[in-house]
Image (cartoon, rainbow, N blue to C red):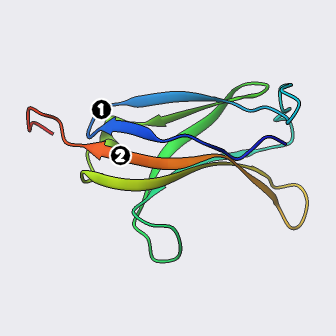
């Protein structure tokens, strides 16, 4: 597998922000997401227990694509600063679950220049 990939993001606080993760195998072919029932997009002020977390949405939109969104409602609650994020997929059928982090990185949140957030 060719993940997790790392990509840093710039985000204006309070805006709606969407992006698509095109999940690939190491050879560049599409990774088949069938069997993965849960998709998560988490943002935190630091990695590990006790971090303040914010939840974006993650949904499968194609056989190998996951659409991630920070809604304006969630975005207004994230103070300006630097955060970490992970996009994960989970197959809940086996025990224990199979979890893959498909994208990770740093999210830099900037206040809106108008100050109207």
Q: Is residue 91 above or below residue 68?
A: below
Q: Is residue 25 above or below residue 3?
A: above
Based on the displayed image, in which of its 4 quarters is residue 64 positioned? top right
Residue drawn where x is 74% and y is 33% of the image: 23
Residue drawn where x is 58% and y is 39% of the image: 58
Q: Is residue 83 above or below residue 36?
A: below
Q: Which image quarter is the C terminus in?
A: top left
Q: Which image quarter is the N terminus in?
A: top right
Based on the displayed image, in which of its 4 quarters is residue 95 positioned? bottom right
Rendered location of residue 11, percent (x, y): 34, 37
- Contact check, label 1 and label 2, Cβ < 8 Å: no
Identify which residue, 111 or 92, lies in the foreground.
111
Residue 33's disc is none
Say left or right for 110 vs 95.
left
Rendered location of residue 113, percent (x, y): 12, 33
Q: Nearer the viewer, mark 1 or mark 2?
A: 2
Say left or right for 89 vs 98.
left
Find disc 1 in the rendering and name its residue.
Answer: 15
Identify which residue, 1 or 93, lies in the foreground.
1
Rendered location of residue 3, percent (x, y): 74, 44
Q: Secondary structure under badge 2?
A: strand
Residue drawn where x is 85% and y is 36% of the image: 26
Rendered location of residue 86, percent (x, y): 57, 51
Q: Characterize the local packing of mark 1: few (<14), some (14-19) or many (20 or more) Cα atoms within 10 angstroms.
A: some
Residue 108's disc is 2
Q: Secondary structure under badge 1?
A: loop
Residue drawn where x is 79% and y is 25% of the image: 63
Is tag 1's residue or tag 2's residue first in the polypeptide sequence?
1
């Amino acid at each position: 597998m060719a993940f997790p990939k790392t990509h840093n993001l710039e985000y204006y606080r309070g805006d709606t922000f969407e992006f698509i993760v095109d999940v690939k195998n190491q050879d560049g072919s599409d990774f088949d997401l069938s069997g993965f029932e849960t998709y998560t997009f988490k943002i935190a002020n630091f990695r590990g227990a006790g971090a303040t977390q914010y939840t974006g949405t993650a949904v499968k939109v194609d056989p190998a694509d996951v659409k991630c969104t920070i809604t304006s409602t969630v975005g207004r609650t994230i103070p300006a600063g630097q955060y970490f994020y992970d996009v994960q997929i989970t197959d809940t059928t086996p025990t224990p679950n199979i979890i893959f982090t498909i994208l990770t990185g740093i999210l830099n949140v900037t206040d809106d220049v108008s100050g109207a957030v």
